[in-house]
Amino acid sequence: MTRPDAAPPCWHYAPAPHDGVELAHWQGTQVPLLQPHFHRQTQLSFVLRGSRVVEAGGQRFELRAGDCLAIPAGVAHRGLAHTHAGTVCLNVYAPAERTGAACVLDGQALDALEWHEPVSRIARRLGLGREAFTRRFAAQTGLPPHAWRLVDRLNVARERLRGDAELADLALELGFTDQSHLGRHFRRVFGVSPGRYRRGMRPPSQTS
């Protein structure tokens, strides 16, 4: 049996003609499961043929041909495993007004730099115990702190992969054990390996 994280890449990414916009498409029969995550961009998910199922903001949406789901930047969501022959999906990622990595909890912004600290220390600074902070954080963001931190690092990796960063160096810089560790998480969240994503986002002149 093939494990989900061992499956070949399924989503294909490419830059759009407009600056800062990127596209991703998938087609086939078994729409794959993606782990809960968020983006720094606004995501528009179109179903051109067939259907797919998405959880976003705590709600479940079944999208059919002609449907579009708008997911604001920072909103936790995931694509659910779904079977429908001939499905074609298109995602459009457009820059949001606020593209920073800060997370807002009870009106207080937690900057990405704070995520190098232990969660218990962040909780104390906000006057909460660790468990109370974790529950409140998950209720407001859709992800527990450790998962939010992981996805935030993956979003940074995704941005950096549009440039010339070496995969091994990038993995260590962002706190992953090695390149393979980064690759496993990247694929589970974005549906493609880091290398395949970078090749898709490069102009043709840089991939020949």
Image (tube, grey):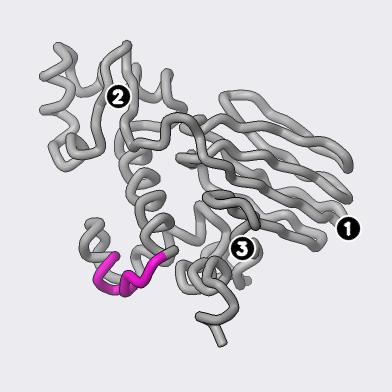
Position of residue 153 in the picture relative to residue 142 (left or right) = left
Q: Which residue is mark 2?
A: 134
Sequence-wise, the earlier of marks 3 and 1 is 3
* C-alpha span from label 3 to label 2: 36 Å
54 or 6, which lies in front? 54
Q: Quadrant of residue 172?
A: bottom left
Q: Which residue is mark 3?
A: 14
Sequence-wise, the earlier of marks 2 and 1 is 1
Please tell me whether residue 89 is drawn above or below residue 160 in the rendered image. Answer: above
Instruction: Find residue 99 and report its horizontal and vertical position in percent.
Output: 41, 36
Q: Which residues are magenta?
A: 163-170
Instruction: Find residue 184 and report its horizontal and vertical position in percent.
Output: 43, 64
Whether tag 2 and tag 1 are in contact, CB under 8 A, the answer is no
Mark 2 residue crowding within 10 angstroms, few (<14) / some (14–19) / many (20+): some
Whether tag 3 and tag 1 are in contact, CB under 8 A, the answer is no
Q: Which residue is mark 1?
A: 85
Pick the quarter of the image with the N terminus: bottom right
